[in-house]
Image (cartoon, grey):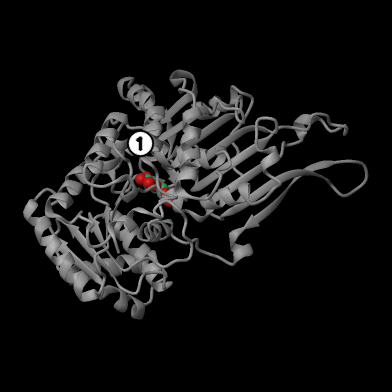
C-alpha cells in the first residue's frame, strides 16, 4: 500500500468491512478505564468475530507487570464486565501483552517499539498500529512526542492512528495547546478524540429516527417544539476517582462533551450524507448557534451531601476518600441554553447532570407545544402536552405520549404512552458496549463518531465562562443536595421560573 492510501477513506462510514490486521497499544494499561472498558470492549469484538484475523493488544504503563500478570488482571476484569467464557478468553489472551514503562522516558519508548515490532511480526499483524491514550490527560502531549521521537508514529509501513480520551484539555487555551502538540505528530485524519456517548447505540439511533423516518422532520422545529430536556443522571458517586474528579468537576467531565453531544444529536440539521465530515460539519454549526450562557440566571451548580441511594446510606462528596472537607467542586450542573438559528430560535434546551442522583437515567425529552385550539371541554392544564422521549439508558427505547379518550360514558381524556423498547423489539437485554463500536471504528479508519478539533474548541468556548465563574465565585451553600435526590432546589426553580418542570418519562 502506498502512503497516499492511508489518507483516504478515514471520514466515511464503511459499515461491514473488517478492520485491517493491526496492533492496539494501550497507554495507561494499569488504569481503571483499561480494565472496565477497553479490554472488555476488544474481548467482546473478539467473541463476536469482528476483529481482524491478526491482531494484538499491548498494554503500556508504569506498573511493573509481566504479560501473565497483566492477562490475569484483565481476565478478572472481563469476567465481571462481559459475557465471559474461559475457552474464548484463553484464545484471546494469547494476543495480549504488556510492557512496563514511563510515559516520559525516551528509553522506554525504544523498548516499547522493539516489543511491538516483535509481537506484530510473530502475530502477523503487519505494520498498522492504533495507539489508545487512556493515561492521565497530563501525559497526552508527552506520549505523542514519545511516539514521534521513537519513530513509532511513522506511518511508512502501515497506518498509525491515535485515540485520545476526554477531557481534551481543561479549557480552550489548554485544548488548543494540546491539539498543537498532537498535530505536531499526527494529521487530523489520524486523530480520534473519543466521547463514548457517540458509540452508544441509542445515541446513534437518534439520527436514524430523525433522518430515516419522514414523520419527525416536519415537526422538528420551533413551530411544534416547546422545549427540550436533556438529563444524564447517575446514582453512583465518584468512587475511587477523587484525584481526577477534584480537578475536573461536572462541567468538564460531562457537560463539555457528553451533554453537548446529545444537544447536537437533537438539534442537528440534516447532513447531506452520512459521513464523518458532513455529519461533523453540522454538529459544529449547532454549537456555533449556542448563545453565551447567562451565568447568574441560567446556570445552577450543586454538590451532594450524605443521603440514601438504593436503600443504603451514601456519604457526601466531601466525605469521599481523598476529597477535601471544604471542596467546592460541583458534582451537579443544570443549564438553560438557546440555539439561535432558524429552526430553534426561542426554544429553550434545559440540560442537567449529576452524581448521586435519584437514579441512573439518560434521557432526551422533546416537549411539544399544545394544540392551537382545544374543542374538548377538558381544562387545558389537565392535558399533558405530547412528549417524545429518547431513553438512552437504562431500559433503552423511545416513548411517545399522547392524549386518548378513556373508554366509558362521557368524554374523559387521558395521557397514554406508546413505547419502542430495544429489549422487546430486538431481543437485546444488554446493549452493545459503546467502546467496542468506537474501537472498531478506529481500527477501520472511520471518524464519524469521534469529535473533531473545531467541535472541541466550540464546546470549550461555551463552557469556559461557566467553569471560570464557578471557580472564582465560591459557593456558600455546598453541599446543597442530598445523595439520592434529583439535585438542588435551584435546578427545579430554573424551570419553574419558565412555568415548566423536569420530567422523568
Ligand atoms: C464518563 C465520566 O465519561 O462518563 C464519568 O468520566 C461518568 O464520570 C461516565 O460516570 C458515564 O458514562 P455512562 O456510559 O455510564 O453513562
- Image quadrant in which you'd find residue 415: top right
Measured as percent of width and height from the top left, residue 281 is found at 47, 39
Measured as percent of width and height from the top left, residue 253 is found at 36, 40
Ligand 1 within 8 Å of disc 1? The answer is no
Residue 318 in sight from this viewpoint:
no
Quadrant of the image for the C terminus? top right
Residue 226 in sight from this viewpoint:
yes
Q: Is residue 46 left or right of residue 494?
A: left
Say if 72 sits above or below 434 in the image.
below
Q: Is residue 36 left or right of residue 178?
A: right
Query: Badge 1, how many Cα within 10 Å: few under 14, some, many 20+?
Result: many
Q: Is residue 117 left or right of residue 365?
A: left
- Image quadrant in which you'd find residue 307: top left
Which residue: 20% across, 43% down? Answer: 141
Q: Nearer the viewer, residue 337 or 25?
A: 25
Q: Is residue 92 left or right of residue 387?
A: left
Which residue: 14% across, 61% down? Answer: 113
Q: Nearer the viewer, residue 476 or 47?
A: 47
Query: What kind of element bears circle 1?
Result: helix
Which residue position is annotated with label 1? 252
In the rendered image, the residue lying farthest to the right is: 409
Say if 282 sits above or below 101 in the image.
above
Say if 428 sits above or below 451 in the image.
below
Amino acid at each position: 500500500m502506498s502512503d497516499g492510501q492511508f489518507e483516504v477513506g478515514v471520514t466515511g462510514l464503511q459499515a461491514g468491512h473488517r478492520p485491517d490486521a493491526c496492533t492496539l497499544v494501550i497507554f495507561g494499561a494499569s488504569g481503571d478505564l483499561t480494565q472496565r472498558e477497553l479490554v472488555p470492549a476488544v474481548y467482546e469484538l473478539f467473541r463476536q468475530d469482528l476483529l481482524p484475523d491478526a491482531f494484538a493488544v499491548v498494554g503500556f504503563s508504569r506498573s511493573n507487570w509481566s504479560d501473565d500478570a497483566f492477562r490475569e488482571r484483565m481476565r478478572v476484569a472481563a469476567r465481571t464486565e462481559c459475557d465471559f467464557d474461559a475457552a474464548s478468553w484463553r484464545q484471546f489472551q494469547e494476543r495480549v501483552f504488556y510492557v512496563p514503562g514511563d510515559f516520559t522516558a525516551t528509553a522506554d519508548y525504544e523498548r516499547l517499539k522493539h516489543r511491538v515490532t516483535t509481537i506484530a511480526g510473530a502475530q502477523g499483524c503487519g505494520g498498522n498500529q492504533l495507539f489508545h491514550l487512556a493515561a492521565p490527560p497530563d501525559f497526552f502531549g508527552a506520549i505523542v512526542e514519545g511516539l514521534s521521537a521513537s519513530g513509532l508514529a511513522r506511518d511508512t509501513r502501515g497506518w498509525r492512528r491515535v485515540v485520545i480520551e476526554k477531557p481534551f484539555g481543561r479549557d480552550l487555551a489548554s485544548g488548543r495547546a494540546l491539539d498543537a502538540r498532537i498535530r505536531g505528530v499526527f494529521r487530523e485524519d489520524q486523530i480520534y478524540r473519543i466521547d463514548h456517548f457517540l458509540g452508544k447505540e441509542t445515541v446513534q439511533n437518534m439520527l436514524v429516527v430523525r433522518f430515516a423516518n419522514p414523520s419527525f422532520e416536519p415537526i422538528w422545529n420551533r413551530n411544534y417544539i416547546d422545549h427540550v430536556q436533556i438529563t444524564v443522571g447517575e446514582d453512583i458517586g465518584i468512587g475511587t476517582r477523587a484525584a481526577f474528579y477534584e480537578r475536573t468537576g461536572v462541567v468538564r467531565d460531562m457537560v463539555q462533551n457528553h451533554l453537548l453531544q446529545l444537544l447536537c444529536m437533537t438539534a442537528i440539521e440534516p447532513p447531506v450524507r452520512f459521513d464523518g465530515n458532513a455529519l461533523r460539519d453540522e454538529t459544529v454549526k449547532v454549537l456555533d448557534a449556542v448563545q453565551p450562557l447567562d451565568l447568574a440566571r441560567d446556570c445552577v451548580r450543586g454538590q451532594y451531601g450524605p443521603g440514601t441511594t438504593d436503600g443504603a446510606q451514601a456519604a457526601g462528596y466531601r466525605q469521599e476518600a481523598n476529597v477535601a472537607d471544604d471542596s467546592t467542586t460541583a458534582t451537579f450542573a443544570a443549564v438553560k441554553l438557546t440555539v439561535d438559528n432558524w429552526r430553534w430560535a426561542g426554544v429553550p434546551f434545559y440540560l442537567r447532570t449529576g452524581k448521586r442522583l435519584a437514579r441512573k437515567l439518560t434521557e432526551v425529552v422533546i416537549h411539544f407545544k399544545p394544540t392551537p385550539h382545544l374543542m374538548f371541554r377538558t381544562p387545558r392544564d389537565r392535558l399533558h402536552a405530547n412528549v417524545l422521549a429518547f431513553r438512552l439508558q437504562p431500559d433503552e427505547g423511545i416513548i411517545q405520549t399522547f392524549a386518548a379518550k378513556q373508554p366509558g360514558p362521557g368524554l374523559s381524556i387521558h395521557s397514554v404512552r406508546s413505547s419502542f423498547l430495544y429489549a422487546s423489539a430486538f431481543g437485546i437485554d444488554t446493549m452493545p458496549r459503546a467502546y467496542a463500536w468506537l474501537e472498531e471504528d478506529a481500527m477501520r479508519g472511520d471518524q464519524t463518531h469521534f469529535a473533531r478539533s473545531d467541535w472541541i474548541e466550540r464546546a470549550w468556548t461555551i463552557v469556559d465562562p461557566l467553569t471560570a465563574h464557578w471557580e472564582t465565585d465560591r459557593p456558600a451553600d455546598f453541599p446543597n443536595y442530598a445523595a439520592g435526590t434529583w439535585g438542588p432546589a435551584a435546578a427545579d426553580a430554573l424551570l419553574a421560573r419558565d412555568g415548566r418542570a423536569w420530567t422523568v418519562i
